[in-house]
Amino acid sequence: MAGFELLILRLECVFEAPLRIARTAQVKLLADAFPHFLRRASCDTPSLDCRSCRRRPGCAYSTVFEPMARDAAAGIEFIEDAGLPFAIRPPGAGGSEARFDLVLAGDAILHTPAMIEAFALLGRAGYGRERLRFRVASVRALDASFSPRSAPVDPSDLRPLASTQPLRTADVIGTVSAAAMKTASIRFVTPPLLRPGKPIERVPFGLMARRVRDRIRIVGLVHCGGEPEIDLRGVAVRADAVTLAPRPRGSGSDVIEYFGPLHDLVPMLRLGAVLNIGEWCAYGQGWYDVARQ
């Protein structure tokens, strides 16, 4: 592993009928189905325990869901799915053409073909209660702003993607302006599950920062050979000094404003925005955007 690297892909899909499943409902569908189809895409002996399989080191399913380096994160408290080295951004409901954005981290990048094949298998089996089928029409690489950085390729021949270099931490973080050091505007596309129970509508910054920190640390230690080159020390103390701005009376905005000493925390927030946070983060829960300044 070359360090904390990310590959962001867009899977353009064509559904046999308009997709009418909300993103939050798709999260549960993906959490139930994706592990099954990744195992089918990568494993010749699905009945065998991963720990006793001789093919384990080169298996996509084992790398993602049964990593041999999981003890590297021992002692870090984290909630379910925080250690999975991928994040899916499911499509919005609407038309018959939709896209899944897929973020792969560290050693999961080596298994890009199997990850894409898992989506192809899911599409052939059918999506949701109505078993709505779809096909993966094309795949392309994206940059850190989720804009295209490669031409679309046929999913049956991913060789042109092999020359696409993964994104490094600096590519995702970008430049932190003076304004970004004092205020952060966060919009949750899907509500975060940061504690057991219901989503929190107005997320305290201290809680959010802790979950972002843990997500990044665990993925880094287990799947990237180490944490990224950003300062994750003392996050809790620094985050507790950041305050949540009051929502204006009658405001219907879904943007949350935070104020305070953010200059050391913005890099972490931007990296967390790519990976999602909280429970079911790998499947699209806790997907948030950070306004660039």
Image (tube, rainbow, N blue to C red):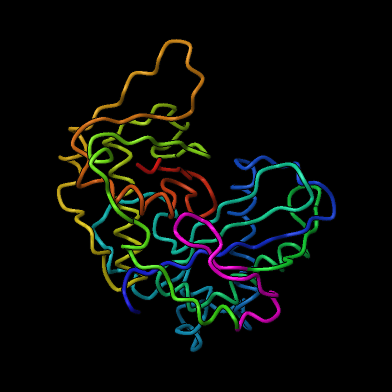
Identify which residue is drawn at 80% across, 46% down: 18
Residue 149, image x, y percentages: 53, 66
Q: Is residue 241 left or right of residue 270?
A: left
* The stretch drawn in magenta includes residue 146: yes
User: Which secondary structure class fits the magenta region best?
Assistant: loop
Q: Nearer the viewer, residue 149 or 158?
A: 149
Q: Quadrant of the N terminus?
A: bottom left
Residue 171, image x, y percentages: 36, 62
Residue 101, image x, y percentages: 57, 57
Q: In which image quadrant can residue 30 be found?
A: bottom right
Identify which residue is drawn at 58% across, 54% down: 31
Identify which residue is drawn at 49% across, 24% down: 253
Identify which residue is drawn at 55% across, 74% down: 112
Furthest residue toward top: 249
Q: Is residue 1 left or right of residue 119?
A: left
Q: Is residue 213 above or below residue 203?
A: below
Q: Is residue 176 left or right of residue 140?
A: left
* The stretch drawn in magenta includes residue 241: no
Q: Nearer the viewer, residue 171 or 222?
A: 171
Magenta residues, start to end: 140-159
Q: Nearer the viewer, residue 241 or 139?
A: 139
Q: Is residue 182 above or below residue 10?
A: above
